[in-house]
Amino acid sequence: MIAKKISLLLLIIFSTFTSFAQEKFTLSGIVKDSKNNETLIGVNIYIPALKIGTTTNEYGFYSLTIPQGEHQIEISYVGYQTIQQTISLNQNTKSNFAINEGGEELQEVVITDKKGRINIKSPEMSTNKLSIATIKKMPVVLGEVDVLKSILLLPGVTNAGEGASGFNVRGGGADQNLILLDEATIFNSSHVFGFFSVFNPDAIKDLKLYKGGIPARFGGRASSVLDIYQKDGSSKNFHMNGGIGLISSRLLAEGPLVKDKGSFLIGGRASYAHLFLKLSEDQKDNSAYFYDLNAKLSYKLNDNNSLYLSGYFGRDVFSLNKSFTNIYGNSTLNLRWNHLYSDKLFSNLSLIYSDYYYGLDLDFVGFKWDSGIKNYNIKYDFKHYITDKLKLNYGLNGIYYEFNPGTIKPTGEDSGINPDQLDKKYAFEPSLYIDAESQLSKKINVSYGLRYSLFYRLGPSTVNLYENNNPVLFNTDMGIYEKATPIGTEYYSKNKSIKNYNNLEPRFAISYQLNDDQAVKASYNRMAQYLQLISNTSSPTPLDVWTPSDNYIKPQIADQVALGYFRNIKNGAYSVEVETYYKEIQNRLDYIDGANLIANDAIEQVILNGQMRSYGLEIMFKKNEGRFNGWVSYTLSKSEQQTPGRTPEETGINNGQWYSSAYDKTHNLAITSAYNLNDKWSFGANFALQSGQPVTYPNGQYEYLGITVPSYGLRNENRLPAYHHLDISATLTPRSNKDRNWKGEWVFSIYNLYNRMNAASINFRQNMDTGANEAVKTSIFGIVPAVSYNFKF
């Protein structure tokens, strides 16, 4: 009996000890830059002994649940020194970290150096992240650092045309990219017709491009997501920095509102090349310039609550002889509230406004045209750290759209006449999502999620009605598509639903770790895009007319699968990424021959719903450490479009065959490198080579009333010549910078070093001497040297 009692007592003691030994606690906090208290996105928090870890979210927050006891924790971030610190954990603990760009050592902290390692364990793939420090080392056209042009050096990304800041991802159109600045949608990303992007590099904190495996929190576009966050501003000290270039200059100021609690940031850019035109008698009435403004306020109410208010405003002005004036640009505003419900549950509530405006003033014909798109967005996101092996992201949002395809206002003597308003359109897009990331075993990590999106095309609006609900007819005798004549109209009152859609958008990704340095990953995602860009040009122009899905325009549905191999070499000194993908897109718009898209109040009469597909192989090799570093990327791909006939009698576009899309670039090679010679001189170089853009050339000609008229064959069966250029730069940092508050640097660059005259387009015209048609190549850039001076204090 006594023996039984002793055994029972020992069992209870052993059980209690076992339970205590397995008890876990949560370590959470914020990771910041030690110099300015700027929160850092995507910092790796890792426990080597347990082989578990996490990353900071968009606001620098992390949470990790681990067994109690003493642990060595490793904090690493690209461009910053990796630190290792020992922490004793016997209760839920908040621990904030401040990491350094420089070589300062912290007490009780071991500093190591690991840069650019691929996260082998994470199921995340088809993503690229560039630091602003890396971007600023790249030589660019006209000496202006350009965020968007830097991503053209990544695999799977090509330019939308010489001098254009738009980009194409994995064979998709520029309109299929969701571009976010502090969560606000940017509808047009270019300044000066594509020579510059709208993003001031001094104001940018983080940039991440998702080409596939897109998390469920993102939706609304079919190809990619470019997620950009502005800096918060220093809450420690006041700083200013900027740059003076040949074409434009910039200035940014940041500092504390309340020491270590609140901060502000305000920055502006402006170009002034148009001022030189005033010196020429022939050009004094012409101008082309841009200006923009970035602003942000941040305030920490307490340990669990923070507020952010950020905005952007930009405008481009192009004027020709005072008779033609073009003004366009973006405006955004975002109010955000971060709330920490617990050490495991982080939330962010955002109220967002975004507006793209396009205005055209034509004095010589006596009218002014205004158009644009606005949206109002409310979103509430949660990040829930359930355990060390399971994390959830979930949330909901609703976007209300207002589309203005055009308001035509008479000017001059007819200014009193009422304006002609094309039918405005309205829509509402609510959605909700849930995303999970979990560790199934030591080698297998998965992420999976589901997004449920809805779309309502709303009134007030007048909708054209057609026989058999068909706005585009096919003339079987002539073999061409023609506009149908409406048989009537139907008016829908305010907020009445005209047409609605809903879609389930599943997302899945998996990583299988072969060993500590190698992994195989796979992903699948479905995306629904309810907005369509009405444009039949291959590169983005300021005239971006967006329209919602409705009775005749169906939403684009994209399905993409990807498979990849990832490897770190020599402890991350080198890395290799190899991915292959296949993407299909339903309901991609195609245009009938001779389609008139501008100021068309019946756009459904000239468009057809087709389909698109793209597939390819991407390879990227990176050298991450040492004085000399950079990467080589190569993409072999195909992008095609098809619009078959709707009936056996119809031939469809291009006889219903697949044809190269305007974004098809078979070969895409990019090489970028940086070399730090010493603390005074550093050098950079970029080389880009792409297959020529698909175009349609004449395949014959005929005479009509004494005029030689070209006749064209199938769409995009020809190509422009191959596109390539080499750029170099040298940065001089005076050694005297170390001993003074004012720090400056000189950047010397040459764009297109060997003066390659790449074809932006090839047009055909009649030679006045011979009467025959001849090809005329248009090139934008030859060799372009530039110098700029950057400073900070």
Image (cartoon, helix red, strand yellow):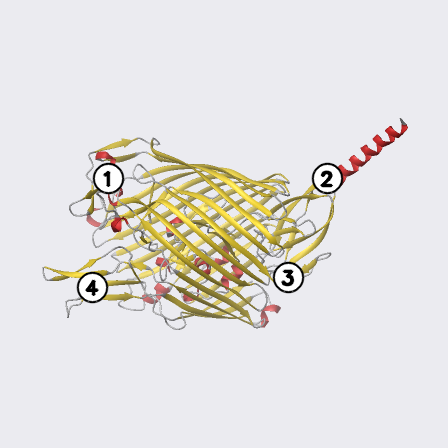
* Mark 2 Cα-neighbour bin, 10 Å: few <14, some 14–19, many ≥20: some
Is tag 4's residue or tag 1's residue first in the polypeptide sequence? 1
Dot 2: element: loop
**Where is the C terminus found, in terms of image quarters?**
bottom right
Q: Is residue 590 left or right of residue 191?
A: left
Is tag 2's residue or tag 4's residue first in the polypeptide sequence? 2
Q: Is residue 586 left or right of residue 597?
A: right
Which residue is label 4 attached to? 765
Q: Is residue 220 above or below residue 143?
A: above
Mark 2 or mark 4, whichever is nearer to me: 2
Which residue is label 2 attached to? 23
- Rendered location of residue 508, percent (x, y): 51, 44
Residue pictured at 45% horizontal, 64% vertical: 670
Q: Is residue 287 visible?
A: yes
Question: On residue 113, which mark appears?
Answer: 3
In the current view of this chain or complex, which residue is farthest to the top?
1
Please tell me which residue lies in front, 598 or 776.
Answer: 776
Q: Amino acid at mark 4?
A: Arg
Q: Is residue 762 left or right of residue 94?
A: left
Residue 717 found in image quarter: bottom left
Q: Are marks 3 and 2 in contact (CB under 8 Å)?
A: no
Is tag 1's residue or tag 3's residue first in the polypeptide sequence? 3
Dot 3: element: loop
Question: On residue 430, which mark appears?
Answer: none
Q: Amino acid at mark 1?
A: Pro
Is tag 1's residue or tag 2's residue first in the polypeptide sequence? 2
Which residue is label 1 attached to? 471
Residue pictured at 36% horizontal, 34% vertical: 500
* Mark 1 Cα-neighbour bin, 10 Å: few <14, some 14–19, many ≥20: many
Please tell me which residue lies in front, 779 or 513.
Answer: 513
